[in-house]
Image (spheres, helix red, strand yellow):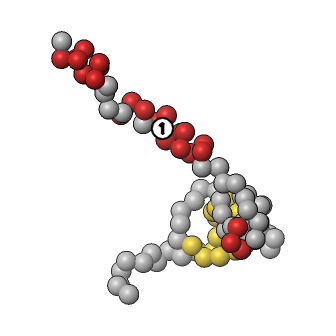
Amino acid sequence: MKKGIHPETYRTVVFKDISVDKSWIGKSAASTKDTITWEDGNEYPLIKVEISNHSHPFFTGKMKFVDTAGRIDKFKKKFANFSKKTESEEQESEA
């Protein structure tokens, strides 16, 4: 592996799968502003994840609907103003 490309700031964090409300402790260099008090009484940074081995259909054997439609609608709404002009709009702008 190349030297100097990996972060040096690994720390103990709590990962929380928000879809099934499961948490576990691990190491990560990801930044977060959230914190949580763990079972041992110490406070750790909290990293929220949407899918983990506790909720993924491959590991659980249960199909689960993942809300991607809300994200797509949000994206389309955000970038609606950047769509191509129609032919009538182009003719009006040329006149």
**Which residue type carries mark 1?**
Lys
Q: Residue furthest left?
A: 94
5 left or right of 78 in image: left
Q: Position of residue 10 (x, y in %)?
A: 54, 76
Q: Position of residue 37 (x, y in %)?
A: 76, 64
Q: Residue furthest top?
A: 95
Q: Where 73 sits versus 37, above or below?
A: above
Please identify the quarter of the rendering in which residue 48 is found.
bottom right
* Residue 23 seen by the camera: no
Q: Position of residue 1 (x, y in %)?
A: 38, 87
The local secondary structure at tag 1 comes to: helix
Taking the spot 29% from the left edge, 19% from the top edge, the residue there is 89
Badge count:
1
Q: Where 94 sits versus 7, above or below?
A: above
Taking the spot 29% from the left edge, 18% from the top edge, the residue there is 88
Q: Residue furthest front?
A: 87
12 left or right of 41 in image: left
Determine which residue is flagged by label 1: 76
Q: Position of residue 35 (x, y in %)?
A: 67, 60
In this orientation, which residue lies closer to the viewer: 24 or 7?
A: 24
